[in-house]
Image (tube, rainbow, N blue to C red):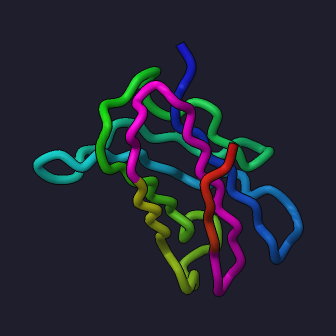
Amino acid sequence: MSSLITTHVLDTAAGRPAAGVPVRLEFHGEGWETLASARTDEDGRVRELGPGSLPAGVYRLVFDTAAYHGERAFFPEITVCFRITDGQAHHHVPVLLSPFAFSTYRGS
C-alpha cells in the first residue's frame, strides 16, 4: 500500500534539496492528531507519510525548519493546512524554502 500524502522540500537559496527536515502529518478531528512523521531524504522527499487511505477532512503538514536552518531560523516551523475531499487520491504538497521565505502548492 502506498502513501496518499507525499512532500518535497527544496532549498531555493542553496539550489538543492533540503535533506533531514522533520515532517508531521496531522488530521483535524476534535483537535489536531498526529498520523505520521518522517524526515526528508537526501533528495528532500518524503515518499511515505501516512496510510494508504484517508477520510475526507482537513489535514496539515508541519515542517520543523529550525532543525534544518538552525536556532536562528526566521520561520522555525512551517504549517501547510489543506483539505482532502477524495480519500483515495494522491496528494503531493511541495515546499520551496529559503531562510526568509517559503511557498507551497498542490503538486502532482
Q: What stretch is highlighted in magenta?
A: 83-102
- Which residue occupies 51% across, 60% down? 63
Q: Can you say whether 87 is above or below 31 in the image?
A: above
Identify the residue at the far top of this view: 1
Q: Where is residue 89 in the image (x, y as percent from the top left)?
A: 52, 30
Q: Can you say whether 75 is above or below 79 in the image?
A: below
Identify the residue at the far left of this view: 30
Identify the residue at the far front of this view: 85
Q: Position of residue 19 (x, y in %)?
A: 72, 52
Q: So how many labels did they put on this image?
A: 0
Locate the C terminus and report the quarter of the image it occupies: top right
Q: In the displayed structure, does residue 87 sit left or right of residue 78?
A: left
| Residue 104 image-quadrant placement | bottom right
Q: In the displayed structure, does residue 17 sit left or right of residue 86?
A: right
Q: In the displayed structure, does residue 58 sit left or right of residue 15?
A: left
Q: Is residue 88 covered in magenta?
A: yes
Is residue 67 or residue 82 the one in the foreground?
A: 82
Q: Can you say whether 77 is above or below 93 in the image?
A: below
- Which residue occupies 75% across, 61% down? 10
| Residue 9 image-quadrant placement | bottom right
Is residue 83 or residue 23 the one in the foreground?
A: 83
Q: Where is residue 36 in the image (x, y as percent from the top left)?
A: 40, 37
Q: Where is residue 59 in the image (x, y as percent from the top left)?
A: 36, 49
Q: Is residue 36 covered in magenta?
A: no
- Which residue occupies 31% across, 37% down? 56
- Which residue occupies 38% across, 40% down? 85
